[in-house]
Amino acid sequence: MFAVFKREFLSYFRTPVGWVAICLMSVISGYYFSNMLASSYVNIAMEIAYLRTFFVILIPIITMRLFAEEKKNGTIVLLYTMPFSIKEAVIGKFLAAMALQAIMLISVFSHIIITVVCSGIINSATWGAIFGYLALAALFISIGMLTSAMTENQIMSAVVCFVVILFIIMLSQIADSVSSIIQAILKVTGLYGLKESSIYSAGNAVRNALNWLDPYEKTACYTSGVFKIVPIVFCLSFAAVFMYITYRVLEKKRWSQS
Amino acid sequence: MAKKSAKDNIIRERVVKAPKVKVSSDARFAVLKKVSVVSVVLILAICLVFNLLIYLILDKPLTFDTTSVKSNTISEYSKNLLKSLDKKVDIIGLVDENDSIEWKEYFMPLLEDYVAKGDGKVSVRYVDPDTNPFILSELDPDNVYKFEKGQFVFVCEDMKVALNPYSCFSYDQSVYAIYGVQLPVVNNVEMNITGLISYVTSNNPLHAYFLQGHNESESHVYLDTIMQSIGIVTSDLKLSGDSAKIPDDCELLLILQPMFDISVMERELIQTYLDNGGKLVIVNDFGDNQQVDYSNLNMITERMGVTLEQGILHEGDSSYLVNSGDPYTSIAVPSSEYAEYIRIPDRFSVEKIRYMSVFTDKSSDVYVSPLLNTSSLTSVDFLQKEIAGTATTGMYPVVLQCVDTSKAKNSCMIIFGTQDFTSDAYYGVKSLNDNNAKFVRACLGDICQIDVSVSVPAKTIPSFSLTRPISSSSVTFWSIVVMAVIPIGTLAAGIYTYRKRRHL
């Protein structure tokens, strides 16, 4: 597993991918930070909350090549034949992407140092926000890895990953729309003969259920100084599920190839 | 022949068996596929159920408030109140809990803590009137309370009261003046919520009314918060028209800085109210209203042995001045008896104090006691210079308490000669943890006979403003570093590595 991790992690820096991702992250975070600095009001937790919306761009860049490139170059066969299991390969690649994501936070750490130098405040919410950011990153990287395992076209992998993350970002708006649609259908068709207040309750129940799945909403508490274990468990457990699905996809391809 | 037949048989067997081998491989692949699909579905389902259970069972126990002032955790006072509750309180947030709202981070975790520590006596739910319009008619069928989106409604049996979240904060006035942005600096959320829970569960809730109709300041958000924190709910009152009357449930009437005198009818209504054991608070400084003739208001105060004069107190003791060179902004200290009684032996910042003269020949049934005084070197600057000299240098009252014992029920009045104990402008800058807030709280508790010895503190919101001003050249320098030097450096390193390795 360590061999895969090392190979994958170093490959980010042997190609422009890792550098471009770090550069992009530092431009985005630097823009937000310099605006805060100009107003003499610096809240790093807010900066990290802002950066979370850019997962939609950064995660596909990091993950698109993880398996798609191996397939395209035919080196995937090496993974199947090497003296380690596919599980280890999946975990190694995941950890490499996570390590890159952590390195991308260097720009944020440089902002923390500048804030301290300029007599600003760094409090528990800042560290909580970083924690929440990494938990979300783990979830999205596992999703990106899955999309990469499903295709040998890197662009296709990036686009699918982008769409999935965008869907998750917009989950609360989607939940609102789904709720309204269900309410409208129940109202128009008169299905089950529900009362109007029950129709609204049904719509709201669907909306709440969808919102419960929103990882952004779950990890928002960290920026306000509330530290919860449950959102971390949520992100990591679903990351594990997506990694398992990635493993199953690779296993299936392995046997279908033979 | 037999040999050939045997060979044929083998060939036939191979031909017949060959597809069987293929079927076996396909079957294995199909089984693998089935195992994959089933295991993925199963693991997804297990993950969902596991997270749901974890959320339902462990979300609250595994939530930690890491803020320095514990802004997401209720205080001992609130915990004790929850323990003593014998009724259930339902708190309904008329908001979409998934909307991004500025105050959300200060309300929702704290309300969760109320629920967690309420032992089933407090419930919280969020209902958005936009998606569920029935909630408004369900809460207020007769449209008496006029609840609206964005409010929190506290319901206990027949008692209902609304809370506007935006009124639960003190804002930085200097930031507002410069940037036009309301920056919260102090969070009074717990103070408000606990006060309203106390109010709706109280068997004898107290109601205070603010007299309106004389260009008084309509906004008394911070005073409302202070009063709610001790279980008094406030409303505005206009005494105009033939049917005007002071409501029977009026525990306390407040007249805050009227910009013109009250009418004769209002005077009579207030006098009747006082004759029946009413309680009155008057706030009247010597600011924009210095030209106003308060004849009718003075007829009320004079029955209690006090006159509001057209003069301002001039502090002569430099050690009492807040800003040297400004004799009208000074320090007031509690009178010796009152300091011991209210247990706030401190100094209070006050400005533009109206001179109040106390009758020497007042009725023996009337008791006037100064609660706060100036230094003994204070003089009076009169509006009309010709009457200068009627008040000598000495100690003058800043806040007075008057009690009339001549009627069956004692009437009581407190007169504040400054707005610095009640105004939004003062608390907007100083916050509700200021000594003046503690003083006015003690006064109101005293007049309404409420125990205010324990209270919910206001919680400061960490200021992310840089404590040392940063020069524009420093801002430019750091902006160039974070937006240009670091990204370009990274990109250059990437290009260098790529060029070096592309032919490898």
Image (spheres, rainbow, N blue to C red):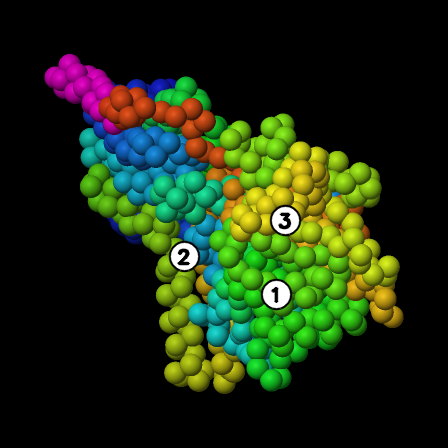
Give the image location of residue B39, x and y in percent. Answer: 47, 48
Circle 2 chain: A
Q: Residues within 10 Å of mark 1 (few under 14, many from 20)?
A: some
Tag 3 residue: B355
Res. B356 visible in picture: yes
Contact, CB < 8 Å: mark 2 with mark 1?
no
Mark 3 belongs to chain:
B
Q: Is residue A77 visible?
A: no
The residue where tag 2 is placed is A172
Could you tell me how far apart the alpha carbons at marks 1 and 3 are, in whole angstroms? 15 Å
Task: Give the mark toward the camera: 2 or 1.
Answer: 1
Residue B213 at x, y percent in the picture: 53, 69
SS at circle 1:
helix
For the record, the magenta segment spans B482-504
Mark toward the viewer: 3 or 2: 3
Q: Looking at the picture, which amino acid does disc 3 mark?
A: Tyr
* In magenta segment, residue B500: yes
Q: Is residue B95 left or right of residue B178?
A: right
Under mark 1, the amino acid is Ser
Per the model, the C-alpha gap separating discs 2 and 1 is 61 Å
- B307 or B30, which lies in front? B307
Is B162 or A213 nearer to us in this picture?
Answer: B162
The residue pinned by badge 1 equals B295
Q: Magenta stretch containing residue A33, yes or no?
A: no
> Which residue is painted at 43% across and 79% down in the image?
A186
**Which percent across, then down, holds residue A124?**
53, 31
Magenta: main secondary structure equals helix
Whether residue B111 sits left or right of residue A22 in the image: it is right
The residue that appears at 43% across and 53% down in the rendered structure is B100
- Please tell me which residue lies in front, B265 or A97: B265
SS at circle 3: strand
Asked if both marks, 2 and 1, belong to the same chain, the answer given is: no
